[in-house]
Each structure stands twice: as structure tokens, then as C-alpha cells.
């Protein structure tokens, strides 16, 4: 929200990367939004006008388009309401416990919303290039038949009016949340659905994930003069409204005659626009060296001010680490805003709850800001590949927090492994190719997306080594920024960096529920030598790092390559001798290894001492005398 005097340069810089995807034949659609909206803070209703220039970069002729009307989910009997009622483990933010005799049941909070508490978006006067476009609303989707077909490479202009009502805050967006923030305006406008190489992505909204079209937003918000706003984009008229985002703790000078003020924001090359507003926001800023300005907007509540002040230098540290690890954050501002219902990422900002412990506040901020790389610059279709967004974000969060921690962990991702193992044990795991809306329960979805998605990267470190993982992440970001990368893109990037074959890994880990389980079957002495037999119990093949510690305190490492990789990992510890053994082909259930030492000289043998291989039963990974 920095008052921007270099907007042309920002547009030019970002446009360089638009559609710079290395895949031959890649294309993506483009949108340019202009919106004017007026908010009534007494009724929480708003009126708006939208003009949208839509460019069809696909090879297809389009005869229909679809808009998301997310607010319509917050109505009794909506698809979201039905999902809360039917799922075995409803989200506690969207349901409440009701005593029914001796039993306690979960009741949907949406089901009992009154007419003045629901959310809605009503569309009128919809035109394409000035001609009426036939349309109908189906739940949270607006289906539009084009007045004229849109041919490949051509643009068309849609215009419409919309009336909205901000729902009681239940999930992400809404008014008057549990911490008293008045307006959390996410997914608040008619939003064009994405059309990509797989067709229209016009899923109904049931509180899961999103997929949006890259474009530019020009938004004017008229609201009571006593409110302070924060969100996506750069404020264009700070001097006009008496509020300058360049100054921390600025005293707002409001024109006395004005009842309402119009805030004008521009957000270049993003796929969403979000804002929040409250009369009692404190606004602080912090500067990332040679980087973005970070804005902090939070309630003037004495109980939280110290935590929010302490959060600011830590957030700067984290952005520096993320920049160094993945690639530079490409915008000039990022905002951390108290609002919403926990933590949710948006373009150039996050809405998070602001109360609770400092560690909780820092952890949520670390996670949501990391989404700026793995969703708001690398914009995967998180409805279909939530593990790429939530999982990679969790990896970066854990890595960053560990880097700034006083006491560092050898494996900062250990909680993700525990979560994944518990999911496997539960028997409720579904493949990561499952659409986010199709998981049977919330918990398996969360573990699959966050924990198992995180392990995809931490286990990739086990497969190709730490240096190669870091090179892979940087190249992935550089190659696919401002596009919509797919699972094959991260896999192929790692292959290009290393030369290893990794298709088997992507297939087993994401498309099946196959598990990894290796064990030490036997250790026997044979004529003064020691014969060790390893067994593959799980379906998923892996290379094996073997650590041998002898009774005299010396250590020796062995590496058993996975034949499917057609590649050998470099020694990760040059101070310890490593012997490379012949490859172990998946078809063979056992592997025999012999060392020229007697069994009595061995203190221990360990499969994967790093703990980065997601072996579901580590009890059989160690032999100790």
C-alpha cells in the first residue's frame, strides 16, 4: 500500500515475467479489472460497478464465461452449509456445539444466519461490449453466455453492477470477527473464473481453495471517513484523503466536510484483490533492506500491542530469508492485517487473528507470508494441487522459523512427519491428486496438503541432497513466476538441476497412497565378515543412506542407489567415508550387503539417520548391539 510514484516501472518489471513459462505452448488468460464500490458501514451492504477487459490467450473460441460469487456461500442451504452439516469432522470455525440430551452435536453456523447476516452478491446490467449477456446464478457461480464468441488472441469487455452484503464472519471473509475487526473483505467481488489447459475451473465455493486469473486491478473504495484500510495494491491518493502510507504512525488528517472518503488502490499483476477496514487500526511499517515495505495493521488493544511490535523485526528477517532461499518478493509492499478467522493468504497481504501468544502470531505470519511465493507468485491450481501450495509454504515457514530460532532443529519438519505417519496409521489417507473439495474429512485433507506436501520437499532433499534442493527451488521460482505451474514442473525442475529421474517419486508420493518402509532383516557373521540383509516392506522404492558406527567410535557410510533414479547422490558429509554399493531394483524384496569386519566390531547400523525419508516404521531401521 505504499504510495507509488513508480507504478509504470512496477508494471514493466512484472510484465517481463508474465507467461514466461518454459513449457512449449504454455498460455494463460489475462484480466484487467476496474471497480468502484461504496460501503454502507451501518448495514454492511455495498454497491459496485465493475468493468473487466478479458483477454483470451487460449487456442480455443469461448462461448461462455463464469464468475465466482463467493459471498453466496454464506446462506442457509448453500453448498457450503450442506458440506458443514454432512462432513464427519466439521471445521470448528464454521460450526458450533449443541447439547442434545446426552449427546453433543455440531451445528452449522451458516444454517441459522438471518437475512441481514447472510452474504450475497447480486448481479445486474451485465453486458459484453455493450450488448446484453444472458446469465444465471447457480449457487456461487454466475454462468454467462457470451453475446459474441471470443476468439483466440482477442479481448472483450464485460461490465456489470453488483450489490453485496458482508456476512457475519464465519470463514475468512465477513464482518465483526471474534476479535472485533469490522470488515474482512476477501472474495468480495464478482471474480472471473480461470480457464486453463484443463478447461474452466468454476468450482462452487465450500470453504476450500482458490484458482484465479492473472491481471491488474484498479479499485476505488468509498467508505466512512473514520475507517483505515489495508490490503492488496498501492494507495494512489494518500494526499487527497489525508492518509500517507509512507509514514509510520501518521496522524490522519481528514477533510472536515467529507462524510466518506474514496481510497484508490492499484494492484499490478495479481490474481486477487483483498482489503480490510476498521476504525481502530494502529498502522506501523517496517522496511526490508533492499526490499519491500511491510505494513502492520492491528487493533488498538493494549493486550496485543507488544506482540505486534515484536512481530515486526521478525517479519523483516523472515522476508529476507525467503528472498534469499526462493527468490526476491517482486512487489513493493506486503501487509500483515488483523482480520479474518485464523490466517489466510491474499495478494500482497494476509488477514490473520491478532490475539493469542507471540509464538502463535509469529508462526501464522511466517506461514501466510510464505504463501506470497508459493501461491501469489507461483500460482498453482490449489484446488487440484493443494499440496504444492500449502505443503511448499509449510516447508518455507519451517525453514525460515528455524533459521531465526535461538536453538535450531536438525529437522525443522519433524512435526509434518508425525502428522503424515498418523494419517497413514488412521487408514483415511487419500491420494494427493484428490480435489480439495473431495476429501472425506477435513483432517486427512489438512495433513495431506500441509504435512505430506511439506515432506515432498524435505524428502526430495533426502533424494537429491540439500544443495540440489535449494538450486531446484530457486530455478523453479525463476522459471515459473507469474504463471500456473503444475506438479510435473517442480519434478522436472529437479531433474534438470540434477540429471536424476524422478517421475517414479512424483507418481508414488502424489498419485497413490503407497508408503515407504525399509528394514534391517538380519545381521549375521559369515567367516569373519558381516552379512546384512535389508528388506523392502512398503511399495515405494527409495535409495538408502546407511550409517555404520563401530565400537571404536569410527563411522562409515554406505549408499544404495535406487535403480529407477539412474543417478547417484553426492556424499552429503565429506568428512565421513562413503561407499557406493550397487543399485537396488524395486522388483527385488531384499538386498544383501557384506562388510569385511566381524559382527562384534559393529555398534549400530541405521537406515537414514537424517530422518528425512518418510519411512512409516522406523523401529526396524536400526540395529544396535
Image: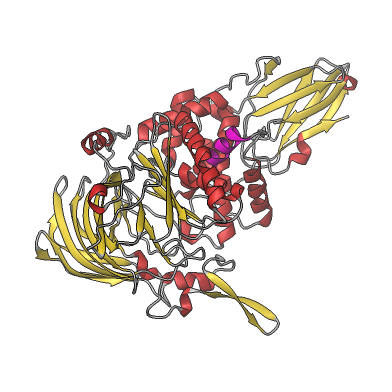
Question: Please, which colouring scheme is shown?
Answer: secondary structure
Q: Residue furthest bottom?
A: 101
Of residues 309 and 322, the one drawn nearer to the viewer in this rendering: 309
Of residues 125 and 291, the one drawn nearer to the viewer in this rendering: 291
Of residues 468 and 540, the one drawn nearer to the viewer in this rendering: 468
Residue drawn at (38%, 64%), measured in percent from left and top?
Answer: 204
449 relative to 495, above or below: below
The percent coordinates of residue 301 (x first, y second) are 52, 58
Magenta stretch: dominant SS?
helix
Residue 461 in the figure: left or right of residue 167: right
The percent coordinates of residue 163 (x first, y second) are 26, 70
The percent coordinates of residue 232 (x first, y second) are 34, 49
Of residues 224 and 234, the one drawn nearer to the viewer in this rendering: 224
The percent coordinates of residue 617 (x first, y second) are 73, 43
Q: Quadrant of residue 459?
A: top right
266 relative to 578, above or below: below
Residue drawn at (47%, 50%), measured in percent from left and top?
Answer: 386
615 relative to 471, above or below: below
Viewport quadrant of the C terminus: top right
Q: Quadrant of residue 118?
A: bottom left
Q: Quadrant of residue 76?
A: bottom left
Q: Residue furthest right?
A: 600
Q: Which residues are magenta?
A: 394-405
Residue 612 in the figure: left or right of residue 566: right
Amino acid at each position: 500500500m505504499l504510495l507509488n510514484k513508480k507504478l509504470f516501472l512496477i508494471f514493466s518489471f512484472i510484465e517481463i515475467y508474465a507467461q514466461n513459462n518454459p513449457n512449449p505452448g504454455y498460455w494463460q488468460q489475462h484480466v484487467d479489472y476496474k471497480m468502484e464500490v461504496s460501503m454502507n458501514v451501518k448495514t454492511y451492504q455495498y454497491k459496485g460497478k465493475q468493468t473487466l477487459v478479458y483477454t483470451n490467450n487460449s487456442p480455443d473460441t469461448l462461448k461462455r464465461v463464469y464468475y465466482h460469487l463467493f459471498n453466496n456461500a454464506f446462506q442457509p442451504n448453500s453448498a457450503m452449509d450442506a458440506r458443514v452439516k454432512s462432513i464427519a469432522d466439521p471445521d470448528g470455525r464454521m460450526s458450533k456445539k449443541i447439547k442434545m440430551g446426552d449427546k453433543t452435536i455440531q451445528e452449522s453456523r451458516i444454517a441459522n444466519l438471518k437475512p441481514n447476516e447472510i452474504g450475497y452478491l447480486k448481479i445486474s446490467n451485465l453486458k459484453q461490449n455493450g450488448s446484453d449477456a444472458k446469465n444465471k446464478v447457480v449457487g456461487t457461480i454466475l454462468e454467462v453466455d457470451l453475446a459474441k464468441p471470443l476468439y483466440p488472441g482477442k479481448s472483450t469487455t464485460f461490465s456489470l453492477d453488483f450489490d453485496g452484503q458482508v456476512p457475519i464472519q464465519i470463514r475468512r471473509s465477513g464482518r465483526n470477527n471474534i476479535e472485533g475487526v469490522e470488515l474482512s473483505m476477501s472474495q468480495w467481488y464478482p471474480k472471473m473464473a480461470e480457464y486453463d489447459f484443463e478447461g474452466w475451473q468454476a468450482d462452487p465455493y465450500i470453504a476450500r481453495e482458490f484458482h484465479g486469473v492473472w491481471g491488474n486491478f484498479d479499485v476505488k473504495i468509498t467508505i466512512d471517513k473514520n475507517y483505515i484500510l489495508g490490503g492488496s495494491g498501492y494507495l494512489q491518493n494518500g494526499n487527497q484523503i489525508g492518509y500517507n502510507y509512507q509514514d509510520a504512525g501518521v496522524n490522519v488528517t481528514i477533510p472536515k466536510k467529507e462524510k466518506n472518503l474514496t481510497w484508490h488502490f492499484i494492484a499490478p499483476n495479481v490474481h486477487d484483490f483483498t482489503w480490510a477496514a476498521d476504525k481502530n487500526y494502529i498502522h506501523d511499517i517496517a522496511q526490508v533492506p533492499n526490499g519491500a515495505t511491510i505494513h502492520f495493521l492491528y487493533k488498538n488493544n493494549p493486550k496485543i500491542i507488544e506482540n505486534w511490535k515484536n512481530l515486526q523485526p521478525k517479519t523483516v528477517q523472515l522476508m529476507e530469508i525467503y528472498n534469499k532461499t526462493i527468490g526476491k518478493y517482486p512487489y513493493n509492499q506486503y501487509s500483515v492485517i488483523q482480520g479474518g478467522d485464523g490466517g489466510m493468504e491474499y495478494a500482497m497481504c494476509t488477514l490473520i487473528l491478532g490475539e493469542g501468544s507471540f509464538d502463535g502470531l509469529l508462526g501464522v505470519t511466517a506461514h501466510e507470508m510464505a504463501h506470497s511465493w508459493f501461491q501469489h507468485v507461483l500460482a498453482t491450481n490449489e484446488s487440484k494441487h493443494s499440496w504444492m501450495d500449502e505443503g511448499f509454504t509449510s516447508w518455507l515457514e519451517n525453514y525460515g522459523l528455524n533459521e531465526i530460532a535461538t536453538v535450531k532443529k536438525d529437522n525443522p519438519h519433524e512435526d509434518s512427519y508425525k502428522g503424515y505417519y498418523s494419517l497413514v496409521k488412521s487408514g483415511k489417507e487419500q491420494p494427493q491428486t484428490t480435489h480439495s473439495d473431495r476429501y472425506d474429512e477435513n483432517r486427512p485433507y489438512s495433513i495431506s496438503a500441509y504435512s505430506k506436501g511439506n515432506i515432498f520437499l524435505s524428502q526430495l532433499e533426502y533424494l537429491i541432497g540439500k544443495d540440489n534442493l535449494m538450486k531446484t527451488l530457486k530455478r523453479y521460482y525463476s522459471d515459473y513466476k507469474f504463471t500456473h505451474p503444475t506438479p510435473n514442473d517442480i519434478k522436472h525442475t529437479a531433474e534438470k538441476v540434477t540429471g536424476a529421474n524422478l517421475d517414479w517419486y512424483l507418481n508414488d508420493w502424489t498419485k497413490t497412497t503407497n508408503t515407504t518402509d525399509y528394514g534391517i532383516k538380519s545381521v549375521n557373521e559369515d567367516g569373519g565378515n558381516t552379512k546384512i540383509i535389508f528388506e523392502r516392506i512398503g511399495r515405494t522404492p527409495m535409495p538408502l543412506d546407511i550409517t555404520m558406527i563401530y565400537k571404536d567410535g569410527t563411522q562409515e557410510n554406505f549408499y544404495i542407489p535406487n535403480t529407477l533414479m539412474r543417478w547417484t547422490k553426492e556424499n552429503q558429509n565429506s568428512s565421513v567415508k562413503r561407499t557406493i554399493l550397487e543399485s537396488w531394483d524395486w522388483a527385488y524384496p531384499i538386498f544383501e550387503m557384506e562388510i569385511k569386519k566381524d559382527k562384534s566390531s559393529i555398534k549400530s547400523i541405521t537406515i537414514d539417520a537424517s530422518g528425512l525419508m518418510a519411512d512409516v516404521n522406523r523401529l526396524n531401521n536400526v540395529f544396535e548391539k
